[in-house]
Every structure is written in structure tokens, then in C-alpha cells.
Image (cartoon, rainbow, N blue to C red):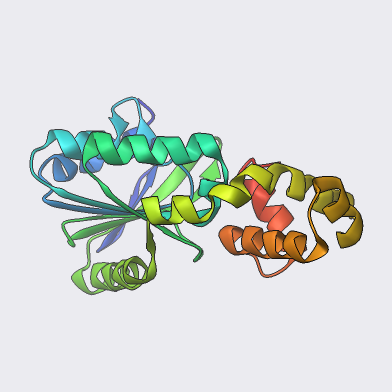
Amino acid sequence: MATGDVRSGAAVTIVRGEEELFRRIGHLVLAATDFSCMAGDVTRWVSDTGNFESVVSRSGRVRIRKLYSSGLLLDAVSAQELTRRRDEHGAQIRITSDDLNETVVVDDRVAILAGGRVDGLRSYSVLTQPETVQGVVSLFETVWRSATDLDVYDAQVAEIRKLAPAVLDLLGQGEKDESAARQLGLSVRTYRRRVGELMAALGATSRFQAGVRARELGLV
């Protein structure tokens, strides 16, 4: 089990590594009745113990809500994995184009914020101060209310998902819209609309940013 260094303050504990995180808060997760999570991809919050959804769903009746980045739905494998997790664990899943910091909230009493990696281990800030946790809860609820149900969003991006690899490749090559549209057998107007849809799904405000986010998600 990876333990890493732990530094504790009055209301914050810094933990290194998923195994240490599970060891320290696993009892809270097992006793949870309400579990909320924001994640940028489907590989977060995983250890040899399993993923958080598995642990929580085994603990009995619990509400599980998860927010994921919209760019994930551009990848068919990730989209299928989200559907599988929803069905297997009884989770409510919504999709948002907002930037998400990897976050877990347990029973509105404990919040875990993911940080960067040092020597291969990711750091996590475990927050217990009620006022601070409530701030994280309020942020989650705000994003949750404006997010889109998984099935609805999946249907919305079904068409652009088919074209995403080719469009991203053409954007990366710096192809002019007219040339790119011709290669894809689309009108220029339709191509530009697809690019706009792709940017929206990636939460990008420019074509360059779309390329960066696509690389971060492993789409190119």
C-alpha cells in the first residue's frame, strides 16, 4: 500500500496516493448516504480497493451523483464506461462543459480535492471544516443544476463524436475550412458548425484550446 507523507492541519489533511486516501477515509465512504463527485476522466479515484462508486454502492442505500467533463463523451469507449458505471452502481451522472477540479464530497461533511503528482503519487487535500466543505458543496450543486443528463448529452454529441478524430486531425494540420470541409464531404457551413460543436464539447473558446484539451483527453 502506498502511504506517502501526510501533513495535517486543524481542518485539512494532505494525503499522497490513492491507497493512503482509501485507508484514511474508507470508513467514511462505507458509511456514506450521500456521495458527490466531479471528475475529468473515468480513471480517477481508483485504487486496489476499487473505485469509489464500487465501495459506496456496496455500503447500502446511498445517493451517488457524478459530474464529468463533456469532452469525455467524444470518446466512444469513455461514453460506454460512464453508462456502465451508471447502470452498475445506480449513479446519477450529468455532463458539463465547465472546468472541473477533481473533487469528492461525502455526506456534505468531508471534501477531497485532488492535486498534482509528485514522484508518481497524486496528492489529495481532505477538508473537514464545515464552512469550507459547505463552499465545495455549493459549487457542486451550482454546476449540477446546470449540467446535462448523461443520456441526453450522449445523444447530442453522437454525430460530432463520429467526426471528432478527423476534425481534430485537420485542425491540427492547420487546414483551411474550405479544404477540410471538402475532405470530409461537408459544406463549409456544416464543417464550421461541427467545429463549433466540438469546441463546445471540449469547453474550448478557441481552436487552439480545443486541440490542447483533445490531447489532454487522449483524443488525438
User: Horizontally, is 148 left or right of 34 in the view?
Assistant: right
Please count the marks in the image. Answer: 0
Q: Position of residue 24 (x, y in %)?
A: 24, 41
Is residue 199 among what the camera can see?
yes
Q: Position of residue 88 (x, y in %)?
A: 25, 33
Q: Quadrant of the N terminus?
A: top left
Q: Residue placed at 22% from the left, 57% from the top?
A: 110
196 or 34: nearer the viewer? 196
Vertical relation: 59 (above or below) 91 = above
Vertical relation: 134 (above or below) 86 = below
162 or 173: nearer the viewer? 162
Q: Position of residue 128 (x, y in %)?
A: 22, 61
Q: Position of residue 49 (x, y in %)?
A: 28, 27
Is residue 17 among what the camera can see?
no
Q: Residue placed at 76% from the left, 59% from the top?
A: 191
114 or 172: nearer the viewer? 172
Q: Residue placed at 67% from the left, 47% from the top?
A: 164
Q: Residue placed at 45% from the left, 59% from the top?
A: 101
Q: Quadrant of the C terminus?
A: top right
Vertical relation: 129 (above or below) 101 = below
